[in-house]
Image (cartoon, helix red, strand yellow):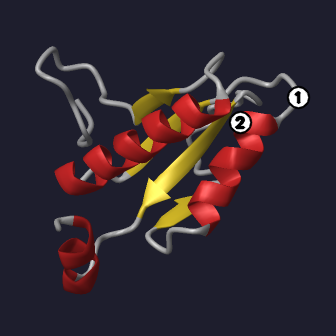
Amino acid sequence: MPKGNHSKGGKPKGPKVIYIRKLRFEEAYRVLDSGIQEAFLKGETLVEVVHGIGEGILRRMTEEYIQNHDFLKVLEDGGLSIGNPGSTLIEILGPSAQDLKKYLK
């Protein structure tokens, strides 16, 4: 079996999924924020945000959220071929000691 992230069942472990599709803007923002913070503190490196297609409001909100946090980066291709226009794949960059102090308050 190739090396990589594997769950207890031996299946490859994919990115953490944050599902905000069909939520109102304020609730989607809270779910996104808490999901990213939780993944950051657990040391996750990949997060998939499922926002749906619709009018693009939740996609734009997700992109703005990423731009406002310097430890997040959108993976355009990422080599994972998710291929879902209704989701955004985010890489969580390793936190510095200063970042951890900021977010662990």
Q: Is residue 100 above or below residue 83?
A: below
Q: Is residue 82 visible?
A: yes
The residue type indicated by label 1 comes to: Glu
Q: Nearer the viewer, residue 74 or 20?
A: 20
Residue 10 lies left or right of residue 46; in this view the side is left
Q: Residue at x 69, y 47 (%)?
A: 61
Residue 50 lies left or right of residue 33; in this view the side is right
Q: Residue at x 32, y 51 (%)?
A: 37
Q: Which residue is mark 1?
A: 55
The residue type indicated by label 2 comes to: Leu
Location of residue 59 (image quadrant): top right
Look at the numbered disc 2 and give the secondary structure of its residue: helix
Q: Residue at x 28, y 77 (%)?
A: 99
Q: Residue at x 44, y 42 (%)?
A: 47
Q: Position of residue 10 (x, y in %)?
A: 18, 20
Instruction: Specify the quadrant that holds the N terminus.
Output: top left
Q: Is residue 19 above or below residue 32?
A: above
Q: Which residue is mark 2?
A: 58
Q: Position of residue 4 (x, y in %)?
A: 26, 42
Look at the numbered disc 1 and give the secondary structure of its residue: loop
Q: CA distance from mark 1 to mark 2?
A: 8 Å
Q: Nearer the viewer, residue 12 or 21?
A: 21
